[in-house]
Image (cartoon, grey):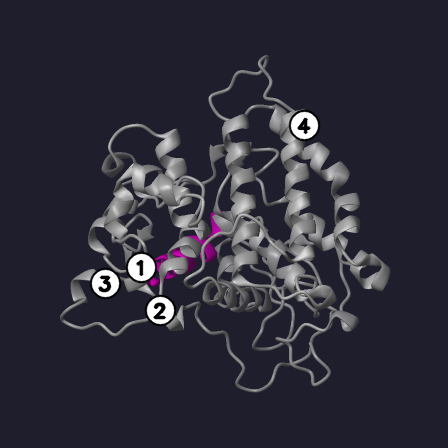
Amino acid sequence: MDGNGDITKFNLNRTKFSQPVKRISDVHGANDFQRSLTMHRLQTHLEKYLEMVHGVDVPSSSSNPNVNRFVRILERLGELISETPARADAPRRFGNLARRDWQDKLEAEQDKLWEEFLPIAYGQIYRDSIIELRFYLGSSFGSRERLDYGTGHELAFLAVFVAVDMLGVWNFGGAKFTGEDFLFIWYKYYELVHRLILEYTLEPAGSHGVWGLDDHMHLQYIIGASQWAGEDKKAPIRPPEVQNSNIVESYAATNLYCNAIAFIFRVKSGPFAQHSPMLFDISRNVLSWNKVASGLIKMYRVEVLSKFPVVQHFGFGTGFFPWVDITKGRSLPAYENNDDHAETTGTVSIHTSPPVLGKTMRPLQLAATQAPTTAANANNTMPPPRMTVGGGHSTLGRYTVPRR
């Protein structure tokens, strides 16, 4: 909180960091997560980033020294892939066992990587923050045990990005952090993740199969659609054109939406409508990038941020992402299991106090990309999520079967 007691403000000098721990043990915890300070911080930062990338292409480099130092971390992790090839003696349909060796090497180097990136010389607090930063970075590339990758790991990298932002490092030393810098880092991240998926044949984590948006990603589509949202008339292509693999490949280096679909075309065969029906339906029925972006954000809240199988592995410390009720400034309840809903007594001792009266969480949205529905664009509007009996739900109303 800041000096005035606002719980939503992050004050580095008043923050105590600790090892993040699991707090979401069932659907009740997932529901509590929705009113947490952590959710507020993730949402408000993501809103800011999506506005920054409107009309911006992924650059080939950055002039921000802080960004370049962080990218060197990702590049070092890419070198570890080269140093840890897939094991030929451990044939598996999904998940080569060498992926665990790669994770072990990552964990062994994390402290050094963070110490080289953070401005350690300017305060002990930066060194103290590593205990939380290393947890989120270590969770950003898939599960060591399950040998999979999915939207929960993508969310962990968002947590890394937001945490570094909260530390003020992106703008450290007078540097100006831009939308180009944001896209440059995320492009490098997805480039690394794609390598991990291909090298170690990582299994999709909790995928809905052909009835899901993508086997692995979701944020990537939101960011990429947001690049062309708000300026639909200036966008180089329209949503229906992503059905053409040649067009998608030509923009894969500058737009993350196309980058994600280009990866699908490289790893899947057959008609786009068959192996990726949801993406195909979006391209066919939603003709505005504004509508694509806003619809995907609504879907992200429902299918990722609100789903227990996805958020159950998110860790909560006492610094960046505490398990605190934003409306009360106190620790959220902790449930032991589905049958025991005993609430943990006491409060978490962190840098929080009751928030300003009336402070509430805002739903994640793209204010700049919302357009009123008229007769002219009514058919181009992505419908809201629809519940289905006995199954999941999706923005396009398709029946989905949750996997645990």
| Residue beneath disc 2 | 369
Q: Name the front one of labels 4 and 1.
A: 1
Q: Would you place residue 357 above or below residue 127 in this image?
A: below
Q: CA–CA distance between discs 4 and 1?
A: 41 Å
Kind of residue sitting beneath label 3:
Thr
Q: Would you place residue 65 above or below residue 358 in this image?
A: above
Q: Residues within 10 Å of mark 4 (few under 14, many from 20)?
A: some
Could you tell which of marks 4 and 2 lies nearer the N-terminus?
Answer: 4
| Residue beneath disc 3 | 381
| Residue beneath disc 4 | 101
Could you tell which of marks 1 and 2 lies nearer the N-terminus?
Answer: 1
Kind of residue sitting beneath label 4:
Asp
| Residue beneath disc 1 | 289
Could you tell which of marks 3 and 1 lies nearer the N-terminus?
Answer: 1
Residue 153 falls left or right of residue 306: right
Residue at image location 42% in from the left, 60% down from the top = 301
Find residue 133 and name its label. Answer: none
Provide residue 390's location: percent of width, then percent of height: 30, 48
Residue at image location 65% in from the left, 25% down from the top = 84
Q: Quadrant of the C terminus?
A: top left
Range shown magenta: 289-309
Q: CA–CA distance between discs 4 and 3?
A: 46 Å
Residue at image location 42% in from the left, 64% down from the top = 54
Determine whether label 3 and label 2 are within 8 Å by CB: no
Q: Quadrant of the N terminus?
A: bottom right
User: Relative to the observer, which residue lies in front, 140 or 82?
Assistant: 82
Provide residue 131's location: percent of width, then percent of height: 76, 52
Could you tell which of marks 4 and 3 lies nearer the N-terminus?
Answer: 4
Residue at image location 62% in from the left, 22% down from the top = 85
Could you tell which of marks 3 and 2 lies nearer the N-terminus?
Answer: 2
Q: Residue extending furthest left?
A: 375
